[in-house]
Image (cartoon, rainbow, N blue to C red):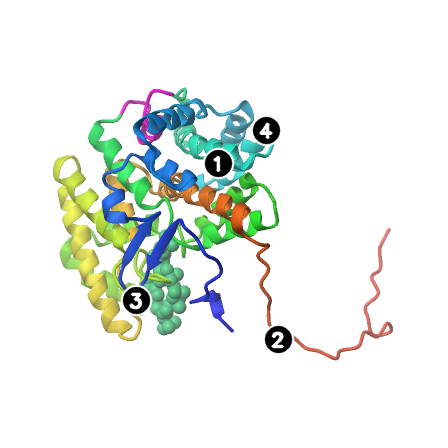
């Protein structure tokens, strides 16, 4: 049995290629190192939805189109208010709000994709403010996607530097082969269900700590370590307790996750000018110690840094609270989910694998032996 479907090729895609042995990620034909730090998020979203980069006037039109779709309906705002009152974790609030994007709208895959991509930053940004006891700020159509998300979160226009750091992050995580949440989305639309249902399911899959939920705990470990001299003792103790180190290891990469390099570079540039440089240096030291100890403990399994470690550092530098790291991942990944759904609807068949039955057989149901259910009145 292929446990966890490791190594199984389940579909073909034109969207991204993950080369686990070479440590390379290609996004719709472009190396992640080339595309993510240089392109606008809107260009990347267009590339994924339409299969090529936009011409300048197409880029401007696409950005305006996204800008017009940012305002939330009252139903979404109400759910977010209720969720905040109930202290709901942000990923759950996003999962509750996402299906309402189809309220009052006819199913139309590309329209649904545009609405979800445009609305996710408003949902997550508004929710952060509501959780903080602040009123959401009105959506602005005149800001870029990344700047708009920061505006929704913090209520003020970000510097170009902050917007660029976030844009690099969103581009870096926009798609990544057939990861668990993308597979979930493809399975859902493969039944000819709608794109908003698929995106809602994908949010649920992303939440788990073995997928998108790792960056908060990765940062917790860096804070727990506190000073470089403590790195070895704290990490050894965690491994002795049989814990996994969050931000390390990957199902496909057997070398360093190339996204970690892109984000490490973005974090270094950002922290050199705007953030706490000491924290950046501490994180580098923690990473080096973790890698050495993982090699010592698991010499047969190559465990390297994954995208989540530097996600944590970069998003912390942008003042995002850890509970909002995974929802921010979703703000980027909703592009990939949408594009995969469109591809699946266009080219795919119903995804319906089989299972090997390993339960008992030949049992006989005997009425006398069965327990009779008594209903007391
Ligand atoms: N720390 C310590 N040990 C680890 C780690 C880790 N981060 N990752 C794997 N191992 C160990 C496992 O305990 C296992 O050891 P064993 O054979 O003695 O039982 C061995 O390495 C193989 O682990 P698997 O679970 O088979 O590897 P898998 O491919 O299923 O796991 C995963 C990949 C889930 C990412 C894993 O490396 C992990 O749990 N990492 C920590 C969580 C994390 O960073 N998640 C984010 C992933 S990136 C993303 O999805 C966006």
Count up the numbered dots.
Answer: 4
Question: How far apart are labels 4 and 1 at the CA level?
Answer: 12 Å
Question: How far apart are labels 2 and 3 at the CA level?
Answer: 34 Å
Instruction: Single out the mark in the foreground, 1 or 2.
Output: 1
Q: Secondary structure at mark 3?
A: helix
Instruction: Single out the mark in the foreground, 3 or 4.
Output: 4
Picture coordinates of residue 310, whole percent (x, y): 25, 49
Question: How far apart are labels 1 and 2 at the CA level?
Answer: 40 Å
Picture coordinates of residue 16, whole percent (x, y): 37, 51
Dot 4 beta carbon under 8 Å from ligand 1? no
Q: Which residue is mark 1?
A: 113
Q: Quadrant of residue 285?
A: bottom left
Q: Which residue is mark 3?
A: 239
Q: Which residue is mark 2?
A: 358
Residue 106 shows up from this direction: yes
The structure residue drawn at horizontal position 54% and vertical position 31%, both measured from the top left corner, is 79
Mark toward the start of the polypeptide (1 vs 2): 1
- Give the label on residue 105, or none: 4
Q: Secondary structure at mark 2?
A: loop
Picture coordinates of residue 327, whole percent (x, y): 40, 41
Q: Secondary structure at mark 4?
A: loop
- Asked if residue 322 is positioned above or below residue 368 in the image, the reply reads above
Which range is magenta? 141-157
Instruction: Single out the mark in the foreground, 4 or 2.
Output: 4
Mark toward the start of the polypeptide (4 vs 1): 4
- Asked if residue 262 is positioned above or below residue 241 in the image, the reply reads above
Dot 3 beta carbon under 8 Å from ligand 1? yes
Instruction: Single out the mark in the foreground, 2 or 3.
Output: 2
Q: Quadrant of residue 42?
A: top left
């Amino acid at each position: 049995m292929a446990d966890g479907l490791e190594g199984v090729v389940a579909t073909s895609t034109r969207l991204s290629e993950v080369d686990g042995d070479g440590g390379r990620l290609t996004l719709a034909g472009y190396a992640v190192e080339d595309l993510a730090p240089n392109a606008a998020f809107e260009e990347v979203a267009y590339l994924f939805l339409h299969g090529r980069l936009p011409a300048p006037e197409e880029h401007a039109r696409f950005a305006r189109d996204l800008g017009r779709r940012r305002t939330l309906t009252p139903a979404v705002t109400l759910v977010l208010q209720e969720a905040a009152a109930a202290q709901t974790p942000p990923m759950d609030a996003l999962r509750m709000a996402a299906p309402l994007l189809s309220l009052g709208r006819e199913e139309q895959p590309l329209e649904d994709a545009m609405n979800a991509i445009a609305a996710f930053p408003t949902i997550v940004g508004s929710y952060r403010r509501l959780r903080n006891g602040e009123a959401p700020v009105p959506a602005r159509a005149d800001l870029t996607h990344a700047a708009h998300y920061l505006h929704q979160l913090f209520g003020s226009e970000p510097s170009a530097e902050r917007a660029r750091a976030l844009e690099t992050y969103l581009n870096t995580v926009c798609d990544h082969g057939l990861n668990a949440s993308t597979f979930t989305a493809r399975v859902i639309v493969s039944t000819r269900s709608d794109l908003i249902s698929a995106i809602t399911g994908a949010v649920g899959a992303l939440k788990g700590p073995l997928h998108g939920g790792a960056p908060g705990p990765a940062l917790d470990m860096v804070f727990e370590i506190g000073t470089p001299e403590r790195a070895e003792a704290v990490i050894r103790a965690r491994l002795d307790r049989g814990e996994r180190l969050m931000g390390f290891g990957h199902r496909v990469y057997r070398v360093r996750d190339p996204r970690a390099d892109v984000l490490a570079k973005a974090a270094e540039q950002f922290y050199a000018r705007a953030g706490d440089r000491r924290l950046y240096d501490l994180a580098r030291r923690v990473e080096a110690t973790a890698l050495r100890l993982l090699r010592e403990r698991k010499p047969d399994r190559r465990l390297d840094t994954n995208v989540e470690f530097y996600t944590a550092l970069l998003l912390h530098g942008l003042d995002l609270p850890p509970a909002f790291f995974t929802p921010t991942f979703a703000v980027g990944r909703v592009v990939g989910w949408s594009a995969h759904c469109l591809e699946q609807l266009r080219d795919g068949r119903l995804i319906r694998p089989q299972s090997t039955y390993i339960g008992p057989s030949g049992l006989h149901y005997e009425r006398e032996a069965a327990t009779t259910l008594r209903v007391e009145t």
